[in-house]
Amino acid sequence: MDFFRENMALLLPIVILELVLIAVALRDLVPRPAEQVTGGNKLVWGLVIVFVTTLGPLAYLAFGRRQEG
Amino acid sequence: MSRGVLFRKEIREILRTSRIYVIPGLFLFFGLLSPITAKMMPQLLRSLSAPGGVQITLPPPVARDAFTQLFKNLAQTGVIAVILTVMGALAEEKNRGTAVLVVSKPVSRTAMVWTKLASNSLLIIFATALAYVAALYYTMILFPGTPVRESLFGTLALLVYLLFVGAMTIAASAVARSQVAAGGLALAGYFVISLLPIFGRFFAKWTPGALVGLQTDLLTGKASMLKDAVPTMAVAVALGLVLVALGSAAFERQEL
């Protein structure tokens, strides 16, 4: 934790970027019907978005969504 | 439908779909992370090695290392991300059947292909600029003596490389029937251009794959921008345009 406190000014933008990506991805995922999600499982994508750093939300935005119809 | 309208449709699509987050988000992440990784590398290695175990000592990191990290990240992961997000540009519209809707308007298929190239190139330029500015800012905070000019030259070589990969992927997307086939085709092309520089001096200087080595050579001052980089960059741009023209010609002959 000392490491984080000492380098706060540097790490903060990355943390903010991470949080923004998580927010954008979750805002897309939550109201979306399960049929329009790759693999059909919203819970798995939710976990990926929250726990896989940076690449999780990006992977969801790139590959998790399907067009209707 | 004029070209302007078509271009605005593309930009709207980029903003509405994931691409506005994926490519700039990933590039910005690397831009922020690369200088930090370069700076922390000795500490990271020290904390990873067990006390009394093998000691790994590195020379103290310098400003240049930040950009070496950035170029390495973007020339690998960045390229894959570009291929994966651009591969659907035309193939997906063919698949979904929306391409039929567009070309049934007074729009030539050629115009459609070139508009896709323009809009996706714009996205790549924006993302690369974002990554560079972030990396430059962090490097200036973390290291003394940031090589602004050299790193900008290296980034330009990187940008042309990424634009070439984007153009190649647009061409693949115009030829292929499905998104996956387009991605496979573009990845195959990526492997070819990555391998070509091995086959002798000529390829090492003139193929787009040479731009990867040029990024670091420009950074260290081993290569000169005007004499070494600009000719290779011009060839890469020309080659990219030829690929898109060929892809567009194939697309004209396809049945939708």
Image (cartoon, rainbow, N blue to C red):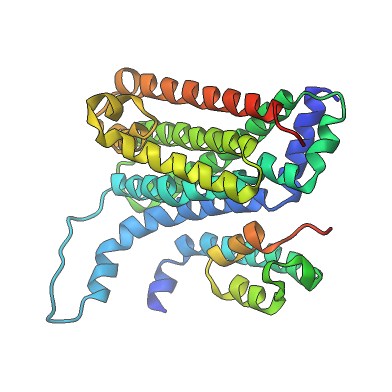
Report the side of B176 relative to B99 (left or right): left
Image quarter hosting the C terminus of chain B: top right
Taking the spot 54% from the left edge, 23% from the top edge, the residue there is B241
Instruction: Tell me if residue A36 comes above or below residue B213 in the rendering.
Output: below
Residue B187, image x and y in percent? 48, 45
The one nearer the camera, A3 or B53, is B53
Residue A21, image x and y in percent? 63, 62
Q: How many numbered circles are shown? A: 0
Image quarter hosting the N terminus of chain B: top right
Q: Is residue B206 visible?
A: yes
Instruction: Tell me if residue B42 comes above or below residue B253 in the rendering.
Output: below
Report the side of B54 relative to B174 (left or right): left
Residue B63, image x and y in percent? 31, 46
Residue B129, image x and y in percent? 52, 39
Q: What is the quadrant of residue B230 in the picture?
A: top left
The one nearer the camera, B65 or B215, is B215
Q: Is residue B125 visible?
A: no
Report the side of B253 relative to B189 (left or right): right
Taking the spot 72% from the left edge, 73% from the top edge, the residue there is A40
Taking the spot 87% from the left edge, 28% from the top edge, the residue there is B105
Instruction: Tell me if residue B175 comes above or below residue B44 in the rendering.
Output: above
Report the side of B58 relative to A17 (left or right): left
Taking the spot 32% from the left edge, 40% from the top edge, the residue there is B195
The one nearer the camera, A41 or B137, is A41
